[in-house]
Amino acid sequence: MSLRCCGLVPTYDNPVTIRRVVERIRQDLADVVVIDDGSHQAGREACAALARDGLAHVVRTERNLGKGAAVRHGLEVARSRGFSHAFQIDADGQHDLGRIAPFLAAAHSDPDAVVAAYPEYDDSAPALRSAARQITRFWVAVETGAWDRIVDGMIGFRVYPIDTTLAAKAKSNRMAFDVEVLVRMARSGVPILNLPVAVRYLRPEEGGLSHFQPLRDNLRMTWMHSRLCTMYATRWCLERLGILGKARRT
């Protein structure tokens, strides 16, 4: 598989950080697609300024559809513009963007793979978020059958092969998308390359803003894991009984 990669930045109300994220991406990638997922006035104006200044191809949705929906839409836009890969980076400025080049090098070495980040936190990381990641890692290991296949399923800093990612048909529209799409791709045999990236949680005055809703997003994550575990357990049973194989042959 050849590789032509763009940056892909889904954003919802990140007016303080979005420009510097895009400008830093452009040091390594000439083209950036920004999906403005229904931002309010300040965020909308910041994205419009990026388009006006020729820094990004900006697509806006009229209402907030969720990160997963924004990433899927961005992948489709990137594909329509002739790109084979998209380096999806969150707009909140928390990730070490100096790590873009090593991730691109890994993607070039194995274009069929997803290059997925796992976080190296400093003291700014909330303890609750770190604990939640460990719970998610447990369920990802159950779903993929390996503890180290996916080191972290939640972080929004990864290179996607576009066709393979869309073919995974992840159903989650919000934060659970990050986890679901990696699990589905791993289960289908797509190589996962895990690389570290430093993560620093920004203070509000620096533009730090989290859209993670602890109750709603954890419930969505629980539903997603329940759905995947049920689907894979059912498939395993049908395969052992020979039923799934018969259905496939017919």
Image: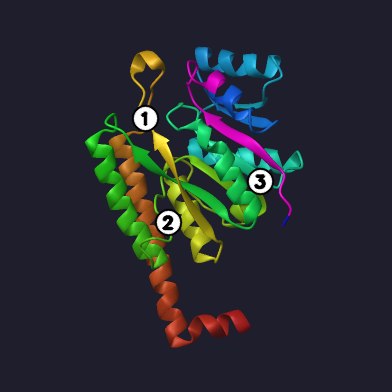
Closer to the chain start, of discs 3 and 1, is: 3
Placement of the C terminus among the 4 image quadrants: bottom right
Find residue 19 and report its image quarter: top right
Residue at figure coordinates x 31%, y 46% from the top left:
133
Residue 4 counted in the magenta span: yes
Q: What label sits on residue 200 in the rendered view?
A: 1
User: Which segment is the magenta one?
Assistant: 2-20
The percent position of residue 183, horizontal first and vertical second, equals: 46, 58
Q: Are marks 3 and 1 in contact (CB under 8 Å)?
A: no
Of circles 1 and 2, the one toward us is 1
Which residue is tagged 3? Answer: 85
Residue type (three-letter) at the residue carrying disc 2 = Ile
Q: Dividing the picture into quarters, in which one does residue 203 lie?
A: top left
Q: Earlier in the sequence, mark 1 or mark 2?
A: 2
Which is more toward the observer, 43 or 27?
Answer: 27
Residue at the spot of label 2: 150
Cα distance, mark 1 to mark 2?
Answer: 21 Å
Task: Measure the C-alpha gap from mark 3 to mark 1.
Answer: 26 Å
Q: Residues within 10 Å of mark 2 (few under 14, many from 20)?
A: many
Q: Which residue does the image show at 55% across and 61% down from the upper left? A: 191
SS state under label 1: loop
Disc 1 marks which amino acid? Arg
